[in-house]
Image (spheres, rainbow, N blue to C red):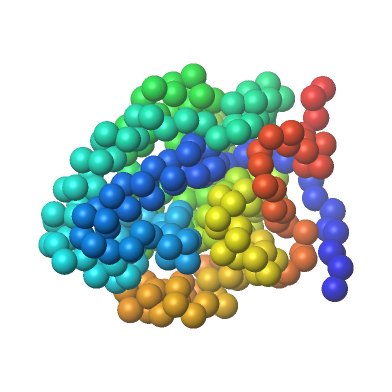
Amino acid sequence: MGSLKPSFPPIRACLFDMDGLLLDTEDIYTLCNNIILRECNRPNLPWNIKAQLQGRPGPEAGEIFHAWAQLPIPRAEYMRKNAELQRQHFPSAQPLPGVPELLATLSARGVHLALATSSHAANFKLKVAHLQALFGHFPEEQRVLGDDPRIPPGRGKPAPDIYLLALETINQRLRKQGKREVAREECLVFEDSVPGVEAGRRAGMRVVWCPHPELLKEYHGREKAVLAGIASAEGGSQVQEVMEEAAVGGEGDGRGWPGRRDDGWAELLRSLEAFPYARYGISDA
């Protein structure tokens, strides 16, 4: 079946994930984990497991990781080692290609920006303290982090809550200014992770999926399911088995439905360089 090619209003707000989308921190997470795995005589983290860690809140990602890793050390020791490595490596994080130009252009064209990251406040500071100019495009009140108390427990990605809250931070400001609020279909979510794409779709927003090249290989042949926000529901061999073992499967809860294949609401981009602004009605006027 071909694309349904729905008619969309121009995009007025862009909501961004951070790790692996704006910054190269997903590779840093992998580096830190692999150092510990090698110390424990365990294999490096494979992408079919890594794919399930991306975008999720720390506690959920931790359950999936430990169900697979079966480390011979106490979890508290792993957390101590991992935190020490992250403190060492996160301050070296850098923007991914096209990100500085994209944020600057969107800001210059009057598009509202908000951040929606599963990173908790402490790690967020480690990652962005040296990148204040880049993150200056996101007003403080329009940064939603993974430990934001307004997000109920268990409602991290792939649930839609973080993106709905990010939109609400924009609309709160617009209401104070007496301006028209942004509707969900006027929002464009930028994500690199599969749970994040599902969160954006379930929030009723358009989505750009810009994955790590290795993640794209992992989902080869299932790209349309990812863009529809239904890849996790379809499961998948070892990945789904690990998720079930960790008791954190991606079951639906009736709040926010994903889309359909080829419904036109999501697009795969391999890079954020040379972003197609006109396709989303983002004018330079």
Residue occupying image coordinates x 55% and y 35%: 96
User: In the rendered image, which quarter contains the C terminus?
Assistant: top right
Looking at the image, residue 169 sits to the left or right of residue 2; the answer is left
Q: Give x and y (percent) for residue 5.
A: 85, 59
**From where the camera sits, is residue 168 visible?**
no
Q: With respect to residue 1, does 191 lie above or below?
A: above
Q: With respect to residue 70, does 270 lie above or below?
A: above
Q: Give x and y (percent) for residue 18.
A: 48, 41
Front-lying residue, 61 or 205: 61
User: In the rendered image, which quarter contains the N terminus?
Assistant: bottom right
Q: Give x and y (percent) for residue 47.
A: 47, 61
| Total number of numbered discs in the rendering | 0
Q: Give x and y (percent) for residue 198.
A: 57, 61
Q: With respect to residue 116, does 108 lie above or below?
A: above
Looking at the image, residue 22 sits to the left or right of residue 13; the answer is left
Residue occupying image coordinates x 16% and y 66%: 72
Residue occupying image coordinates x 39% and y 43%: 28
Residue occupying image coordinates x 14% and y 62%: 73
**From where the camera sits, is residue 216 visible?**
yes
